[in-house]
Every structure is written in C-alpha cells, then in structure tokens.
C-alpha cells in the first residue's frame, strides 16, 4: 500500500474532526474559572459567575405503561408505575456577582503577596510564584468558601481581609462640644 501514510493521516483528520479534538495548539486550561469581569463607570470591577444546578437521586415512581381508555373515554387499564431513582433539583442554576480587583491591579507582585498571605494562613502549600495558577485558585476558593463565597475568583472583600487592598476609611465625624 503506497498511500498508507496519507490514508492514515486522512483517517486521523476525520476522527479528530468528528470528536472535536484539535491536532495542534495549546490545551485549554481547565483550572480557569468561567468568570466574567466587567468594569463599571465608577472604575470598580465586578465578577459574575454562573453556578451550576445541583441534582440528587431520590426514590420516586416512573410510569412504565400508559393508561388505556375505550372510545367513551373510560379507563380500561390504569397506568403502571415502578419505583425507581429519579433526579430531583436541589439547587437551581444561578449567578453570583461580587466586587473583584480589576485585572490591571492584579500584577505578579500582587499575586505573590496574595500567595504569601494564603501561605501564612495555611491555605497554600509550595512556593510563591507570582502566577495565578491552579494551586493559588484552589487556595482562594477554600478561603472564600469558608466565608460564604464559593468561587476561585478573588473578591474585593477577601483582598481587603487579607490586607492586599486598603480598606476605605469612614469620614471623620466632628462632634460639637456641649
């Protein structure tokens, strides 16, 4: 078979096209969260993240045979059910929205400081790299989950709690002497 290599390459191309795989190019980073960051007119940035629906399997009845009716509409044979596990929606799909540091503020130095803060609190193991890698995102998610925000995207509240961003001061109140 003279054309075997060409035939093999053509078959590989067809299989690749059918499976949706790519032959070349970088692999997608699955650790990247699906978070949309938008900047408001006041300069603040907001993150929005879709939360998936959560289902659990519960026992329920599934109709196996449909009821049968005669010409007058009377039930001749009732439906037949069997007990089986069925999916039940526990939490519907939703969206969480929170203030986040703007991308321009998230520099390698900022990330290194974030990593040091997470390391000091026991959420991050390993070395300080200055890159927002999967290990750092996991540490952020664990830290924020304990505080009610299940996201690997750093929130502004977390950044302030870790001392990465200044907390705005309340204006001083002048109390007149009486």
Image (cartoon, grey):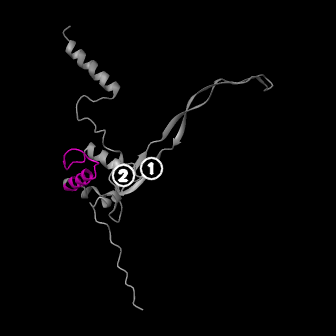
Q: Is residue 40 above or below residue 7?
A: below
Count of numbered circles in the view:
2
Q: Quadrant of the C terminus?
A: bottom left
**Which label sits on residue 95?**
1
Instruction: Classify 113 as above or below 171.
Output: above
Residue 19 horizontal side relative to residue 59, left or right: left
Placement of the N terminus among the 4 image quadrants: top left
Where does the magenta region start and end?
109-132
Vertical side of 172 occupied by 65: above or below? above
- Residue lying at 29% horizontally and 48% vertically, measured from the top left: 123
- Determine which of the numbered discs, if any, sits on residue 144 in the image: 2
Q: Element under label 2? A: helix
State the CA–CA distance, disc 2 to disc 1: 16 Å
Residue 166 sits inside the magenta stretch: no
Q: Secondary structure at mark 1?
A: strand
Q: Position of residue 138 (x, y in %)?
A: 31, 45
Residue 22 placement (x, y as % from top left): 27, 30
Please say if the residues under marks 2 and 1 sit with CB atoms less than 8 Å apart.
no
Q: Quadrant of residue 9?
A: top left
Quarter-of-image position of residue 165: bottom left
Which label lies toward us, 2 or 1? 2
Residue that sits furthest to the right in the current view: 72
> Does the rendering let one see residue 152?
no
How dense is the environment of label 2, judged by Cα within 10 Å: few (below 14), some, or many (20 and up)? some
**In the rendered structure, does residue 115 fall within the stretch colored magenta?**
yes
């Amino acid at each position: 078979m003279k054309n075997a290599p060409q035939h093999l390459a053509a078959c590989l191309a067809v299989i690749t096209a059918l499976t949706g795989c790519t032959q070349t190019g970088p692999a997608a980073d699955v650790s990247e969260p699906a978070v949309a960051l938008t900047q408001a007119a006041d300069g603040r940035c907001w993150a929005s993240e879709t939360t998936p629906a959560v289902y659990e399997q519960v026992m329920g009845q599934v109709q196996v045979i449909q009821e049968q009716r005669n010409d007058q509409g009377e039930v001749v044979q009732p439906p037949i059910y069997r007990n089986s596990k069925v999916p039940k929606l526990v939490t519907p799909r939703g969206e969480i929205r929170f203030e986040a540091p703007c991308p321009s503020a998230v520099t390698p130095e900022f990330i290194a400081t974030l990593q040091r803060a997470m390391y000091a609190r026991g959420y991050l193991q390993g070395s300080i790299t200055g890159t927002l890698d999967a290990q750092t995102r996991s540490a952020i998610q664990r830290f924020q989950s304990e505080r009610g925000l299940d996201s690997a995207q750093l929130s502004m509240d977390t950044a302030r709690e870790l001392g990465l961003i200044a907390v705005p001061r309340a204006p001083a109140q002048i109390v007149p002497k009486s």
